[in-house]
Image (cartoon, rainbow, N blue to C red):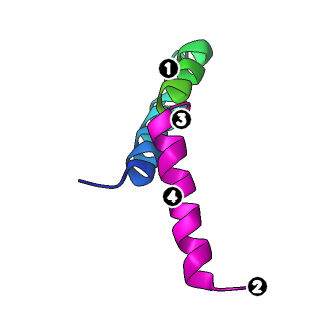
Amino acid sequence: MPDRVTQAVREAQAILARHVEPGQRDCEKTINDLLTVLDDERLVQAMEEKDERQSHQAGPA
């Protein structure tokens, strides 16, 4: 199973891909769908953990 950050990026990309397809667009639905994916506590936590791991790997500044 992909990590939560990767999963969210893929979901957001799919939402945007549907939005740019020819035909009618529902901008409000696109924004709401993106918010559903990106405004998620599990995603925020996963991003914070990923940032923390990267800063530990980089060592002291």
> Of the residues shown, which amino acid type is indicated by label 2?
Ala
Depicted 56 relative to depicted 59: above or below: above
* First to last magenta residue range: 39-61
Residue 28, quarter of picture: top right
Image spot of residue 1 (x, y percent): 23, 53
Proximity of marks 3 and 4: CB atoms separated by less than 8 Å: no
Task: Give the residue number, with chain letter if any, for mark 1.
Answer: 23
Task: Name the residue tied to disc 2.
Answer: 61
- Badge 3 is on which residue? 38
Q: Residue at label 4?
A: 49
Alpha carbon separation for disc pair 4 and 1: 40 Å
Q: Which mark is residue 55?
A: none
The mark closer to the camera, 2 or 3, is 2
Q: Residue at x 45, y 30 (%)?
A: 18
Assign a secondary structure to mark 2: loop
Q: Amino acid at mark 1?
A: Gly
Disc nearer the start of the sequence (2/1): 1
Alpha-carbon span between mark 2 and mark 3: 30 Å
Q: Do the CB atoms of the residues marked 2 and 3 lie less than 8 Å apart?
A: no
- Which residue is at a point 76% across and 85% down the rendered structure image? 61
Say which amino acid is labelled 3.
Answer: Leu
SS for callout 1: loop
Q: Earlier in the sequence, mark 4 or mark 1?
A: 1
Q: Earlier in the sequence, mark 2 or mark 3?
A: 3
Residue at 30% x, 55% y is 2
Q: Residue furthest right?
A: 61
Q: Earlier in the sequence, mark 3 or mark 4?
A: 3
